Image (tube, rainbow, N blue to C red):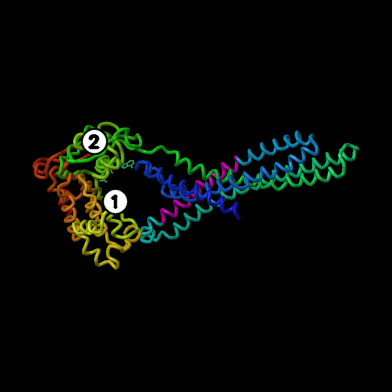
Amino acid sequence: FLELCLRQLLVVRVVVPLRVRLLQNLLQQPLAFYNDQKRGELISRMSSDVSSATICLNTMTGPLLQEPLKLLGPVIVLVAIKWWFAPLLILFMGVIIVSVRRTSQKVHRRAKVRQRTIARVTEAMVQMFSGIRVVKAFGLERAKVVQYTQRNEEFARDAMATETTKAWTRTKMELYTNLIMVFAIVVAMLVVGGGGRFSPGALLAFLMFMAQTYRPAKVLTRSYTDLMDHLAGAGRVFEFMDLPPGMPDKPGAIPLTDVVGTVRYEDVSFAYNGNGNVLDHVNLEVPAGQVVALVGPSGAGKSTLVNLVPRFYDPISGRITIDGTDIREFTRESLLRQIAIVTQDPFLFNTSVSENIAYGKAGASQEEIEAAARAANIHDFILTLPRGYDTLVGERGANISGGQCQRITIARALLRDPKILILDEATSSLDTESEHAVQQALQNLMKGRTTLVIAHRLSTVQHADKICVMQDGRICEVGNHEQLMASETLYRRLYQLQFARD
Ligand code: ATP
């Protein structure tokens, strides 16, 4: 009882910090890491692979520690009875160890493949539930079941391959152990039969102790193959644990305080994963407190440009400054405290409305949360919810409309009270009435802040202090609405196109 409890205690003591460390390490990775990772893969590493690590620990502190000791006693007695048994034993053990190791490595390789397949099964599930609206709207249930079945069959095949190799290793081991037994017995009998110095009593003791080695040897092999199996999962955990933090603060990084809010891009170029330049020598100044709009065709690089300010990515050349200092000189935490982002695809966590707004500022009081909600034109709506601010918003904001969701994220940004604001297509998916409410909330949010706004609807950026037209990763036109409309510009063409369409 004590042994089991203590082992469990050890496992819990190790596994909980392991999970937390893994999560911390994952959260320290830059956004680019997440672009390359599938969600199912991450979930699988955090769940089934961590469980494998737990089993490894259990095996290492249990059978792999105890069984060699259980084996040692009878072996010492055997050698004490007949010394010549020692070299024979070493020989046999050598053969067993080499053979078991070889097949166990095969178990390990197969288990690695199986763990990857488990991740693919999880990925299929995550994809299905994340896109459940599309699945329902397009009647994809059957296709999804087929896909899920295929992945599960792949898993079954890989799991079977691992188990068969494990079974083969164990069978081989039992065969070897039995052969050793038979060999030892035959040798002992021959010694007795040949009138050698082996009394019947010694023979009996010899055989009894020989039999006692059988169980520990069997358990040891089984545990070793289990260990090699689960090490495959544990290895996947440590692959992620060993990732260096994505963008650590520079040594001697300073906190960003007393911000005036002038953001400047100085000859900034950027490429994703070493591919072609998505931003090409961009120069842009966003004066403190002003609104600069980015417009241009899809894929021009607008989102990429704004994503460099919160350091989701760093430029490959050039620099971005806030009030004249390179943003890489600041600690990331203090930089992010001065920035709020409202995206076109607002995300709410499945917790209360209040908590969703409070993510904007650690330790915000209920009064502050409500004040932010009022400024975001969402307070009255929240009061109509069944439990007011304590209402759960549902997975991905399912119980709340797009416009309301957007205004809750605006309240979150207002609560942060940032100096720099990034709005990415914030009103593009809304109907006219919702858009009006959201626009009002945004006006409140933008007051007195340096704002970079991306908009496809050119009607929403006419009042910006400066409009930058982007094309192919460059800023090709700059001016206010009137200036850009006064000549034959890309902006005027885009505007006229939209005007005709609307
Ligand atoms: P849109 O208006 O359609 O949102 P955009 O002007 O904001 O477009 P970006 O999203 O910045 O353009 O994309 C610029 C280019 O970078 C595109 O060619 C796009 O395919 C590429 N790109 C964007 N995100 C990534 C990414 N995570 N990895 C690789 N390439 C990317």
Q: Examine the rendered structure and indicate whether residue 387 appears above or below residue 429.
A: below
Res. 27 image quadrant: top left
Q: Which span of residues is magenta-colored?
A: 105-128
Q: Quadrant of ligand 1?
A: top left
Residue at 28% x, 59% y is: 354
Instruction: Tell which of 67 and 455 is nearer to you.
Output: 67
Residue at 18% x, 57% y is: 375
Q: Name the residue beneath numbered marker 1.
A: 362
Q: Residue furthest front?
A: 2
Residue 235 at what x, y percent from top left?
A: 51, 42
Residue 299, disc:
none
| Label 1: which secondary element | loop
Q: Is residue 39 left or right of residue 344?
A: right
Is residue 117 one of those drawn in magenta?
A: yes
Residue at 56% x, 53% y is: 5
Is residue 78 one of those drawn in magenta?
A: no
